[in-house]
Amino acid sequence: MSNVRRLLILGIAAGLAFSVVGNTAAGFNLGKVLNKVGVSTTESSEEPLYEGEPADGTRENGMVYNAEVHGWYDEKTGALLSRNDAEARRMPAPPGPTTAKCDLIYGIVKAGREDLEVRLENNLLILKTRGSLWDGGTGEKGEISIILPEECKKGVVYKPKADHYFTFDKPNRDGPVTLVRHEGYVIGFDTER
């Protein structure tokens, strides 16, 4: 290692050491001024830092709560989790993808609420709903892959120029999807309110 590099590293280390000592001394002097010398950070306060603080030792989603540090630890690794990571683990799981298989490879999926009505007129699928429609598709094996909010209950799978299409029902977020095959040549879709 060259002398210049050694001096540079030594200078950085010395600067960091003086910075830490200076901050500690400043804190000590401030404590003397305020007549609060010897403030401890290892004791836990009795009042929670935020409302709804769990009891010490509470286990939830692979985490254990420690009231002394007002934080969550990962059960497996023992690592202290940031507040954001802990809150993300405590949130309910987002809706997963709706999965089912059909024989329409690279098809189009349209989904809506319970009021969605699907009919075929002049080779067009007419989708009647009061709400919004969510879009998705099918993969190379015909599997439906679309993330739907919980309020989505019905949908249709079609492929332009195919001689059939499918409607589906999704009774609940994690429940099975029931596909029903319908005969009819489809070239596209239109909406109706």
Image (cartoon, helix red, strand yellow):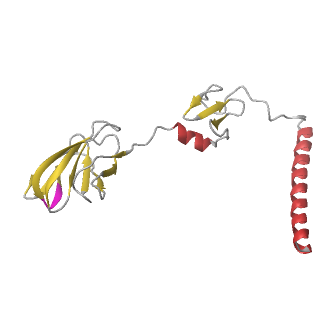
The number of numbered badges drawn on the structure is 0
In the displayed structure, 42 sits above or below 112; it is above
The answer to whether any part of residue 135 appears in the image is yes
The part of the image, by quadrant, that contains residue 63 is top right
167 left or right, relative to 152: left
Of 14 and 182, which appears nearest the observer? 182
Can you say whether 132 is above or below 163 in the image? above
Q: Does the segment drawn in magenta span residue 187?
A: yes
Residue 76, image x, y percentages: 62, 38
Q: Is residue 128 visible?
A: no
In the image, residue 29 sits, relative to residue 63, either above or below, namely below
Q: How far across and down, in percent of the image, does residue 60 sit?
A: 56, 31
Q: Nearer the viewer, residue 115 or 73?
A: 73
Picture residue at 64% right of the left edge, 31% below the top: 65
Quarter that holds the N terminus: bottom right
Q: Quadrant of residue 48?
A: top right
Q: What is the residue that sits farthest to the left in this orientation?
A: 122
The location of residue 67, given as percent across then percent down, is 68, 29
**Does the magenta-highlighted stretch encompass residue 83?**
no
Residue 177 in percent (x, y) is at: 27, 41
- Which residues, given as a range, are shown in magenta? 186-190
Specify the principal SS of the magenta part: strand
**Residue at horizontal 29 percent and vertical 52 percent from the top:** 143
Query: Residue at position x 88%, y 47% from top?
Result: 24
Q: Which image quarter: residue 36? A: top right
Q: Residue at x 9, y 54 (%)?
A: 184
